[in-house]
Amino acid sequence: MAALARWCVRHRLLAVLLWLLALGGATTAAAVAGSAYSNDYEVPGTESGRATQLLDRGFHGLGGDSDTVVWHTAGPGGSVRAADVERTMTGALDKIADLHAVASVTSPYDSQGASQVSRDGRTAYATVTFREQADDIDRADAQRVVDTAKAAESDGLEVELGGTAIGLTESKSAQVAEIVGIAVAAVVLFLAFGSLAASALPIATALVSVGTAYAGIVLLGQVMTVADFAPMLGTLIGLGVGIDYALFIVTRHRKGLKRGLPVAEAAERAVATTGRAVVFAGATVCIALLGMLILRLSFLNGVAIAASLTVVLTVAASVTLLPALLSWIGPRALSRRERRRLAEHGPAPELPTGLAARWAAFVERHPKLLGAAAVLVMAVLALPTFALHLGTSDQGNNPASATTRQAYDLLADGFGPGVNGPLTLVSEVYGAGERNALNDLGTTLRSTEGVASVSPATYAESGRTAFLTVVPDSAPQSKETSDLVDRLRDDVLPAAEADSSLDVAVGGVTASYDDFAEIIIAKLPLFVGVVIGLGCVLLLLAFRSVGIPLKAAVMNVAAVASAFGVVVAIFQWGWGSELLGLGAAGPIEPFLPVIMVSVLFGLSMDYQVFLVSRMYEEWLETGDNRRAVRVGLAETSRVINSAAVIMISVFLAFVLSGDRVIAMFGIALAAAVALDAFVLRTLLVPALMHMLGGANWWLPRRLDRLLPRISIEPPESRSDAGGVRATIPRRRANAAPHEDVRGPEEQERDVRDIAGRGR
């Protein structure tokens, strides 16, 4: 690491140009290639996946995305069957049918369209079938459909549109979120450093690396399945960890300058010490993210690789681009006051004084009380997690102002909530016996609990495939609809298939989402076990202790559980979701636990390493557990809290993105980081370590001999530190005999001077 930092410092112009070239090249290539994202929840081998395959083979006309145009007449006596309304909407639908991207339009004014008009005659809908699936439809083509339909609106006629392709027109951008998050981060950095130049470097480093990663994710979508939210998720994670990693290195660099090191040497040492910890933390984030590959779900594979690519580039920029920039700004990494003090008084190490030292001593005096308070906070916040309902949100969860949400609500009001997510029952048909059985099945379904209506069987031109459309009497994302899917699969269909060769597969929106969630839930324990087990092994090697890894595992689980409690309260129970512009209450995305565990594992490891490594260093030097915990907490809490505030600000800013999934990630990660930094790392962890005493560092001798020795963040040479302290001028040349030339901060008692207290 030292050699790499030395090269970047000596060739700083070349290092900066190489990064700018990478950013420009990747961005140009992405612009030329274009995006090709895919939100394919289908899982090979599931029943819903088989239903989709049967439909694709038997009904080529159903291969395109189906969307809806909904219109509603307002005012007394209004009716969609009125001559002027029928004339207006028929003309609009004819224009939509003539668009080149549209395969067909099924109008309620056709001979078989009676079911597409509500009972009160005030709402009607038409089905627009595109030639392609939503992933392959150009946004401009979907916008033409929207514009054509919306042109028919008048004072008494409301026209709204819904469907996956229409959703493409409701732009979701992270630009506002990025600007807000970066602005808050800049303020925090300036308050922490007091130097505009030093504050700008972490942000510049993160922007270059995240920009390059964003373009890389666009290119990645050309060769594998990448979800449309992957770029924003990568940006969210990249900005958070990128600014934090740079913050840690700049903080160490500034300490070196204050100790009198030349700029180049301070930058090299910062990368050689803290840079190693950054590489370790980034590697753990990537390993945890890539752990999603063991789930063998193509939808998550792309997300894992995209997020990992972002983390890799942020780490690379932190240890290459950042030292080059640090050498460029020279001593301006320090504030004017710090530079003036260095010139007047000479070099001096930073002493852990002030609020951080007082807090460390306070925790030492009251470990049981504070530990109990922390546990209580985490437990209360985790309670909603027991009500967690995994599922996939739909357009009914969109903001109330969105046309897709309004179309959803109009359909639910006019035709019942189930019309927004009908189930499709598909089967191959080989003869008259199967046809009779299918007709009997339709009769049975109409009397089944939870079914609102059933369409007649529709047969393919070949006559070998048929399907029934079942409309539930509940919303697509409700538990009642999921129960209906289970009832059909477990009871109704087996009875209907008993006396025939029918093999009916249940598909549709809810069935697909339930199958996807079931696969993830089944594999989640293995995934969590692998991620937490890996973290325990890494911490065991780093700190030569059994207790430290076990505590870290418990803390990770506590942080995830409490963060999910916050997410359930806001998104599932709807506490403030509409107020925040996040739409109506709904289920939690099934892939959120997987990605949350991955990301939080890496972020927690970052704070854990930064905190405990300083404690471990003091323990090795003194053998005094109380002093080790006190000093470690005092020296690291300020930078941990600053890093946490930055990350929380960046994550919360993504609530402004307009994307429910990204907002869910933002709030979940912000809550997890806040609890991890302010409750766990600076309160519960030191309290527990004080209570456990020397047992924190226990390791069986046999295991100690077998384990390899690694050093994540090697301490700076104590002899060097001692030499610096020996050369500190305690008085000015013209100072009075008893004048203390130390600043106010230095005159406070060093936390090392506080005597250990009994428990």
Image: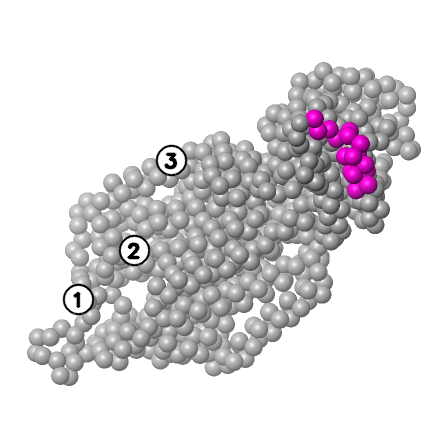
The residue shown at (63%, 33%) is: 409
The residue shown at (55%, 51%) is: 657
Question: On residue 747, which mark appears?
Answer: 1
* Image quarter of residue 352: bottom left
x%, y% of residue 238? 52, 59
The mark that comes first in sequence, 3 or 1, is 3
Q: Which residues are magenta?
A: 77-92
The residue shown at (17%, 57%) is: 754
Can residue 41 be seen here?
yes
- Label 3 sits on what residue type? Val
Mark 3 sits on what residue?
380
Label 1, label 2: how far apart the Cα atoms are: 20 Å
- Label 2 sits on what residue type? Leu
Mark 2 sits on what residue?
633
The residue shown at (42%, 37%) is: 382
Q: Are marks 1 and 2 in contact (CB under 8 Å)?
A: no
Which of 150/233 is in front?
Answer: 150
- Residue at the far left in the pictured view: 737
